[in-house]
Image (spheres, helix red, strand yellow):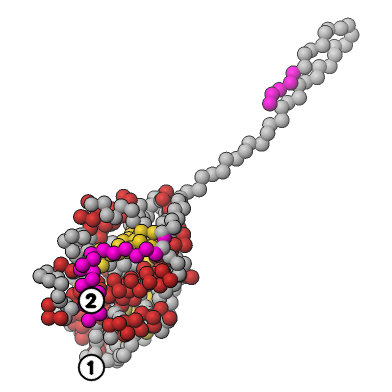
Amino acid sequence: MNRMKTLTSLAVLASFLVVLQACSIFRSAPAKTDGPPPELSKPKPEEKKPEEKKPEAKAAPFNVPAFAREVKRSSYNIAVFAPLYLDSVFATSLEIPGRTMPRYVLPGLEFYEGVQLALDSLQTQGAQLNVQVFDNKSRNTDVASLIRTHRLDNTDLIIGAVSTPELKPLSDFAKQKEINLVSATYPNDGGITDNPFLLISNSTLRSHVEAIHDYAQKGFANKNILVVRRASSFEASIANSIKAAHDRLNYDKKSRVREVIWSDATTDQQLTQYLLADRPNLLIITALDEAGAKTILRKLAPHRGTYPMHVFGMPTWDVMKFKEPEFAGITMYYSSPYYNDKTDLYSRYITDHFRRVYKSRPSDMAFKGFELTYYFVKLLTQDGVYFNKDLNKPGNRVFTSFNFQPVYLKDGESSTEVMPDYFENKNIYIIQKGDSADFKMNSAL
């Protein structure tokens, strides 16, 4: 009931405000006299003063002039975007049909609730904030209309649970107005380049597979590393990213990486010719879909007794269930930029709030909304509008140890010459799937 009231209130108030804020000297020659010529005294050479060195102008951080500016305010304007689907839920009235909230609304709503909890916490610490929340799935508050009507012009920070098609126009606007834009949930750069104001917190697939490769290389002594993929251009691109990671890795004990292309017609003999019995076989499976992942696992499962296996899946494997008996005994891992065992003070605060108000447990979207809002608004209040020269502050850590790094997409670009294409969180956890709970294997990569 309380959650429905929250959504109804949001429908009535599409956005809200939270007021939280020398000269040389020459002697004349003497008159000529008889006798030996007089000795002429030479003019004393002028002493040259040491040249004063002009202080060299410091390059702006990451070659972005705005990042060198210190802009602090008594209060800050923040825009939050969440997919609330208010137009769909309240298409005919302010009553929720059937008194049951549609499932597609819940992720965006819980993200918003996490954001609100973080703002409440920051307000108690004295932060002065003017916050507007926009439903990026609404016809009235879509990104294009907000830009056209100048409703975002005075914004100091944008936090968005956005994806395509909203990310690109929002990114273009942020670049034009030099506003930091935190892409909170979308694990993709959306084809965006040349925008150092874009901060991608949910790491791209390229970063995931690089981290998986590096963990496989460094986490095992003797190993046989195989990239197991289907014959599609998409999975081929994943394999190419792994090869590129192998070439970049400066590690004297790295092993070669071989590629295995499989299909439904692949035979046991064709598969086992790549496997070794005397060392761990580290299989990086590039299938993002559950059906494809389980199909190749079924082909591998009968051989796990003969060939030691460690299977590394894609980040989408975090929600997959491998409860079938045929998968028992296969050690599986996946990658994630987010790990929260929910035992810390912040997590207990969020969990207790949801239990008390909504009689339910918060999803990961609530924790992500809280964490990103708290972390970046904290940076904003500490360092001002352009906090980019120090994005990674361990003292501000909530659940995740962020590692935002500049990304340069063009070959041959030097970080001393050009601006980054964007910043991305490169902290990737390797997580082992368990029967009842998953386990973090590394601190960060």
Determine the residue positioned at 22% across, 51% down. Answer: 148
What label does residue 5 carry, if any?
A: 2
Q: Nearer the viewer, residue 120 or 386?
A: 120
- Tag 1 residue: 325
Quarter placement of the C terminus: bottom left
The outermost residue toward the left is 92
Q: Which of 119 and 329 is in front in this view?
A: 119
**Residue 404 in view, yes or no:** no
Circles 2 and 1, Cβ within 8 Å, touching? The answer is no
What label does residue 111 carry, if any?
A: none
Quarter placement of the N terminus: bottom left
Determine the residue positioned at 44% across, 57% down. Answer: 74
Q: How far apart are marks 2 and 1 (CA)?
A: 44 Å
Boundaries of the magenta span: 1-26
Q: Is 275 located above or below residue 156 in the figure?
A: below
Pointer 2 or 1: first along the chain = 2
Few, some or many residues within 10 Å of mark 2 (<14, 14–19, 20+): few
Which-is-in-front pick, marks 2 and 1? 2
Q: Does the magenta stretch include residue 101?
A: no
**Residue 282 in view, yes or no:** yes
Horizontal and vertical percent position of residue 226: 30, 76
The outermost residue toward the bottom is 325
Horizontal and vertical percent position of residue 34: 88, 6
Q: Does the magenta stretch include residue 12?
A: yes
Q: Nearer the viewer, residue 112 or 17?
A: 17
Q: Nearer the viewer, residue 195 or 418?
A: 195
| Element type where label 2 sits in the image | helix
Q: Which amino acid does label 1 sit on?
A: Pro
Q: Is 302 located above or below residue 423 in the figure?
A: below
Q: What residue type is labelled 2?
A: Lys
